[in-house]
Image: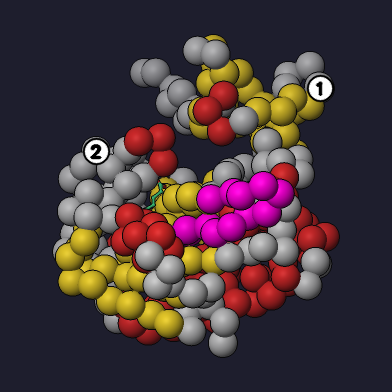
């Protein structure tokens, strides 16, 4: 087993991504090492948001990888394989699991997991990546005001042991990371595309402050979202350039 060959547990940390970064800097973390924590005091999300996770209830972990076989322009493939591993794991428990571009995991319209990837590039190689994974497991109520959180327990009614989740998740991450190391990009690309939330469906988005209807057709090799607009043209968007929104509910 490659991913998860070493698993480090810490009761309380600022953020597992910060611990991973320190271990890399100190030369104390090998490829495939996982750091998981019972509690994060300042868990970080995308776009500078905080990541809410009640102590001991959820999976908050960071995976250290050294994908020096991958050139920096291919780094979105890391995001794809981590998303596929996490989505694949969840599909064993829950129906209607999708990947909301670029790397949120959704169940129907609700977010069950988020991923925060931080890479260090030196010259033409990716020296290390830290994939921070926050998966809502046993927490039932969310208070931070995040728009649509949901947990495994909310959906199935069951409680789960975090150690078991990590071990099973590692199997799925190993499967997809091995595909990446083998250069099997076409399988990764097609599975990621077909897992996308709202794929091939008309839905509302906000672009430059304006609401538009569009249809997700996939992503390009750099991870830009490909969205067909109302006129039938396919436009590319970077992460901060487009926001997913909800259809307006009919007024009475
Ligand atoms: C998101 O905003 O969707 C990304 C959330 C990522 C949260 C995880 S929890 C473990 C790791 N440590 C952090 O501080 N953040 C990530």
Give the spatial CA distance, label 2 vs label 1: 36 Å
The region drawn magenta spans 120-131
* Direction from residue 61 to residue 32 in the image, left or right: right
| Spot occupied by residue 145 in the image (x, y as percentages of width and height) | 24, 38
Is mark 2 in CB contact (under 8 Å) with mark 1? Answer: no
| Image-based side of 122 in relation to 181, left or right | left
Q: Is 217 above or below relative to 54? A: above
Residue 43 visible in the shown view: yes
- Whether 173 is drawn above or below 77: the answer is below
Find the residue positioned furthest to the bottom: 1
* Residue 168 % position (x, y): 47, 81
| Residue 77, above or below 162 | above
Q: Residue at x 57, y 82 (%)?
A: 2
Say whether disc 2 or disc 1 marks the residue closer to the N-terminus: 2
Q: Which mark is residue 145?
A: 2
Q: Residue at x 58, y 65 (%)?
A: 66
Q: Which residue is mark 1?
A: 232
- Percent coordinates x, y for residue 20 in the rendering: 38, 62
Depth check, mark 2 against mark 1: the one in front is 2
Q: Nearer the viewer, residue 109 or 218?
A: 218
Q: Nearer the viewer, residue 78 or 160?
A: 78
Quadrant where the image shows the C terminus: top left
Name the residue located 79 percent from the left edge and 16 percent from the top edge. Answer: 231
Provide the secondary structure element on which disc 1 rests.
Answer: loop
- On the rendered structure, is 181 left or right of 162? right
Task: Name the secondary structure under disc 2.
Answer: loop
The answer to whether residue 98 is seen in the rendering is no
Q: Residues within 10 Å of mark 2 (few under 14, many from 20)?
A: few
Check the image and tell me how it is coloured.
Answer: secondary structure
Crowding around mark 1 (Cα neighbors within 10 Å: few <14, some 14 to 19, many 20+) is: few
Kindly identify the residue that appears in the image at 72 percent across and 70 percent down: 181
């Amino acid at each position: 087993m490659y991913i998860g060959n070493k698993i480090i547990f810490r009761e309380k940390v600022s953020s597992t991504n910060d611990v991973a970064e320190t271990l890399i800097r100190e030369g104390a973390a090998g490829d495939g090492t996982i750091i998981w924590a019972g509690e994060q005091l300042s868990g970080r999300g995308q776009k500078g948001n905080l990541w809410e996770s009640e102590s001991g209830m959820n999976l908050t972990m960071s995976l250290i990888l050294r994908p020096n076989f991958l050139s920096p322009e291919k780094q979105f493939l890391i995001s794809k394989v981590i998303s596929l591993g996490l989505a694949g794991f969840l599909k064993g428990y829950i129906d209607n699991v999708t990947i909301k571009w670029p790397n949120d995991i959704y169940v129907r319209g609700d977010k069950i997991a988020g991923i925060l990837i931080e890479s260090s590039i030196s010259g033409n190689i990716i020296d290390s990546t830290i994939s921070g994974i926050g998966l809502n497991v046993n927490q039932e109520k969310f208070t931070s005001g995040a728009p649509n959180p949901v947990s495994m327990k909310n959906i199935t009614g069951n409680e789960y042991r975090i150690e078991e989740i990590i071990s099973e998740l590692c199997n799925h991450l190993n499967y997809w990371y091995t595909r990446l190391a083998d250069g099997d990009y076409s399988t990764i690309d097609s599975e990621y595309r077909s897992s996308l939330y709202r794929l091939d469906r008309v839905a509302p988005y906000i672009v430059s402050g304006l609401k538009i209807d569009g249809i997700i057709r996939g992503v390009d090799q750099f991870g830009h979202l490909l969205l067909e607009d109302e006129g039938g043209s396919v436009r590319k968007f970077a992460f901060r350039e487009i926001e997913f929104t909800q259809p307006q509910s009919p007024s009475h």
